[in-house]
Image (tube, rainbow, N blue to C red):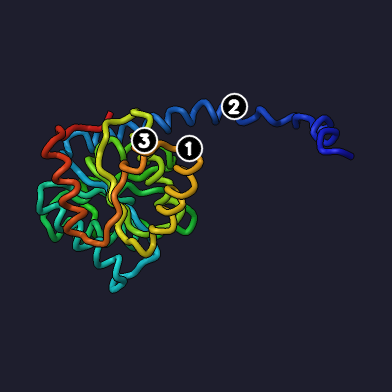
Amino acid sequence: MSSKEQINKLTVPDNFGDSHESDVWSIFKIMGEFVEGYDKLFKIGPCVSIFGSARMDEGDAYYDMAQQTAKKVTERGFGIITGGGPGVMEAANKGAKEGGGKSVGLGITLPHEQGLNAYVDNDYIINFHYFFARKVMFVKYAQGFIVFPGGFGTLDEFFEAMTLIQTKKVNPFPIVLIGTDYWSGLVDWITDTMLANGTISEEDIDLFHLTDDKEEAVEIICDFYQKHTLSPNF
């Protein structure tokens, strides 16, 4: 039997629409997550979102760099927003505490979750069920992204931000990748494949910066706001 014939034989199960009521009510749950996020973060002031792997422990070079970077960012007047988990997120929240800045944790309900790290301010703990609602909060109240080595979730946030800026759905803000050894393969592919095939424009390459220097990462963000106004991104 051909694939087309198989598709034509598919039938809709009798119980396919049984979840309609729960789907409708989930709208209110989604609204609740947005309301809580907006309510808690509305007056938080300028922040930088820091992303990276949850699988890095204290003593790892990138864990330590994330901690130091976050501390320097908060010493320049910014708060820190992370996913509130372990690894790079924990390091960044810890650095925020050390720098005397606000330390935000946007948690997510996951199987076998480890909970929020101990360095998130109690006033800025928000737990989400929906990734998409959580991602809105990362972008709306952050005046910059600093992205350390990480997995699919880190890449998701990085490309989400670049897409929103590219399509002018949000105000431009600086995005910094830290870790040339880790990110150079991706950056080369963006340049040698995407740009070479015309799927992005030359100016899209300027949407992010790559460095190994935590001082440079902080200066990129601070220098940007010598020329731009600090405000929510949309």
User: Which residue is more in the foreground, 63 or 163?
Assistant: 163
User: Which residue is more in the foreground, 193 or 72?
Assistant: 193
User: In the image, what residue occupies the spot 10% across and 55% down?
Assistant: 100
Which amino acid lies under the numbered mark 1 shown in the image of this protein? Gly
Residue 31 circle label = none
Q: Would you say the residues marked 3 and 2 are in contact, meaning their CB atoms lie under 8 Å apart?
A: no
User: In the image, what residue occupies the spot 28% across and 60% down?
Assistant: 90
Q: Residue furthest bottom?
A: 59
Residue 116 seen anywhere in this rendered image of the structure: no
Residue 16 seen anywhere in this rendered image of the structure: yes
Residue 33 circle label = 3
User: In the image, what residue occupies the spot 23% across and 56% down?
Assistant: 93
User: In the image, what residue occupies the spot 39% across and 58% down?
Assistant: 184
Residue where numbered disc 1 is placed: 198
Left or right of residue 224, residue 180 in this image: right
Which amino acid lies under the numbered mark 2 shown in the image of this protein? His
Residue where numbered disc 2 is placed: 20
Would you identify the image quadrant in which residue 71 lies? bottom left
Q: Position of residue 197 (x, y in %)?
A: 51, 41
Q: Quadrant of the N terminus?
A: top right
Q: Quadrant of the C terminus?
A: top left
* Distance Cα–Cα, label 1 vs label 3: 38 Å
Q: Position of residue 118 (x, y in %)?
A: 26, 60
